[in-house]
Image (tube, helix red, strand yellow):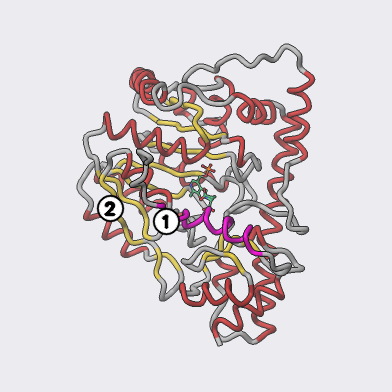
């Protein structure tokens, strides 16, 4: 018999498993509102024009080789990624206090950061928002950190439980790590206001809490790259230290290329350089060095003014289409007379709407209307189009009446 005979079948992932179920459904009306991946009005994945252009340039450049990258990845990709999130004029960058390492997209950046903290930081407790992206708990737990939750979402108001958040972070042991969604909170679509971010910053700095930003949607929330990095830049501006994980999966449509970066902002250039040396010891036995293609695409675009501008135009178009889907769904539910207050659909930002539908209603919509979404009631607005809004409206209407 097999030496693996005792292996138990694992459940499908709460988010990626929705696509597995969707693919098995033969209904022509099926609709995938699960995974946070952009789809066009025609319901198709999108490869940005500027990405195709960059790839063409790379293919045509015969001087390019397929050698190993350094453990920390592609140097100009790292520099350009730091500028993108912290701002080209960031004093932390000018003072050489930032170390940036290319990692396997957002997930890889979070994991490398978690493993680094588990080895070198003194407070092994990390506070993550309730609710948060499903993978966060496992990424930090498996790295050896003790994972706790801070109140974030208030189901009653469908908004931020700001008092609860302040109380929980205020009660956290000093030095605790705090995971913060830089913008477009997943799954709730609820973000603190600038004033609330300032209060969070003051509280965290007063208690020496260590910010770990997860920035997976920069430019996708508002359509503006600088606006969506506002929270991160507010913390870096005070001279304090923080970690930031970046993903290019959504804002550059590089999902399968696995392109991301982890930055650690330190007090001095000397500390940043010693931190980088230890990050290399985390990466080398994990995957040795990162993939060259996706990072080369990003660097090609970010270093060229025209291509950067073309990217911002395409990025805004994606963000605008999602915002338009919010309005269309809200208008459709209002016209249908669907019971309940659906204004959160147009108040929330980013890729997702946290509908407030419960697991039973979600199961009903999947069974009767072939709507695929996560069981927590989250829908990816990017998966919706003008053509499919009526179908989703019918499903929600039936689920709540
Ligand atoms: C907050 C957040 N952080 C990190 C990531 C990691 O992305 P990547 O760069 O691909 O490693 C995602 C993707 N989450 C969406 C995509 C599918 C997934 O769960 O992964 C989602 O929630 O649908 C996030 O939503």
Magenta stretch holds residue 22: yes
- Secondary structure state at the residue bearing disc 2: strand
Viewer-closest of 15 and 71: 15
Front residue (pair 292, 302): 292
Q: Work out whether residue 373 or residue 177 is closer to the camera in this orientation and state it.
A: 373
Asked if the residue at tag 2 contacts the one at tag 1, i.e. Cβ–Cβ closer than 8 Å, the answer is no
Q: Say whether residue 242 is magenta.
A: no
Q: Which badge, 1 or 2, is on the more N-terminal residue?
A: 1
Residue located beneath label 1 in the image: 132
Mark seen at residue 148: 2
Query: Where is residue 118 drawn, in percent x and y?
Result: 28, 34
- Residue count near mark 2 (Cα–Cα under 10 Å), binned few <14, some 14–19, many ≥20: some
Q: Which quadrant of the figure contains the N terminus?
A: top left
Range of residues picked out in magenta: 9-25
Q: Residue at x 64, y 50 (%)?
A: 223
| 321 relative position to 90: left or right | right
Q: Position of residue 138 (x, y in %)?
A: 36, 47
What residue sits 46% from the left and 74% below the top?
358
Q: Is residue 345 above or below residue 146?
A: below
**Dot 1 crowding, Cα within 10 Å, few <14, some 14–19, many 20+:** some
């Amino acid at each position: 018999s097999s030496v693996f005979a005792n292996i138990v079948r694992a459940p499908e992932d709460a988010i990626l498993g929705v696509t597995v179920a969707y693919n098995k459904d033969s209904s022509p009306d099926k609709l995938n509102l699960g995974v946070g991946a952009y789809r066009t009005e025609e319901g198709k994945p999108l490869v940005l024009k500027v990405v195709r252009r960059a790839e063409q340039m790379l293919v045509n450049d015969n001087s390019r080789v397929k050698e190993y990258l350094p453990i920390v990845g592609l140097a100009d990709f790292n520099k350009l990624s730091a500028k993108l999130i912290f701002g080209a004029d960031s004093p932390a960058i000018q003072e050489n206090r930032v170390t940036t390492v290319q990692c396997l997209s957002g997930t890889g950046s979070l994991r490398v950061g978690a493993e680094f903290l588990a080895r070198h930081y003194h407070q092994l407790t990390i506070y993550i928002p309730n609710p948060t992206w499903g993978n966060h708990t496992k990424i930090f737990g498996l790295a050896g950190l003790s994972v706790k939750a801070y109140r974030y979402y208030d189901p009653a108001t469908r908004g931020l439980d700001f008092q609860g958040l302040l109380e929980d972070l205020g009660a956290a042991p000093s030095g605790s790590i705090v995971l913060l969604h830089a913008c477009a909170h997943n799954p709730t679509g609820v973000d603190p206001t600038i004033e609330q971010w300032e209060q969070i910053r003051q509280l965290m700095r007063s208690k020496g809490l260590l910010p770990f930003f997860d920035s997976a949607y920069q430019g996708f929330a508002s359509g503006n790259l600088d606006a969506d990095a506002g929270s991160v830049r507010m913390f870096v501006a005070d001279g304090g230290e923080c970690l930031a994980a970046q993903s290019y999966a959504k804002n550059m449509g590089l999902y399968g290329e696995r392109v991301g970066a982890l930055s650690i902002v330190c007090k001095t250039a000397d500390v940043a350089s010693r931190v980088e040396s230890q990050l290399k010891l985390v990466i080398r036995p994990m995957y040795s060095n990162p993939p060259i293609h996706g990072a080369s695409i990003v660097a090609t675009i970010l270093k060229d003014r025209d291509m950067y501008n073309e990217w911002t135009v395409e990025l805004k178009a994606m963000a605008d289409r999602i915002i338009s889907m919010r309005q269309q769904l809200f208008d459709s539910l209002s016209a249908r007379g669907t019971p309940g207050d659906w204004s959160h659909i147009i108040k929330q930002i980013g890729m997702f709407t946290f509908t407030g539908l419960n697991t039973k209603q979600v199961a009903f919509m999947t069974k009767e209307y072939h709507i695929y979404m996560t069981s927590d009631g989250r829908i990816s607005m990017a998966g919706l189009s003008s053509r499919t809004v009526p179908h989703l409206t019918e499903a929600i209407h039936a689920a709540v009446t």
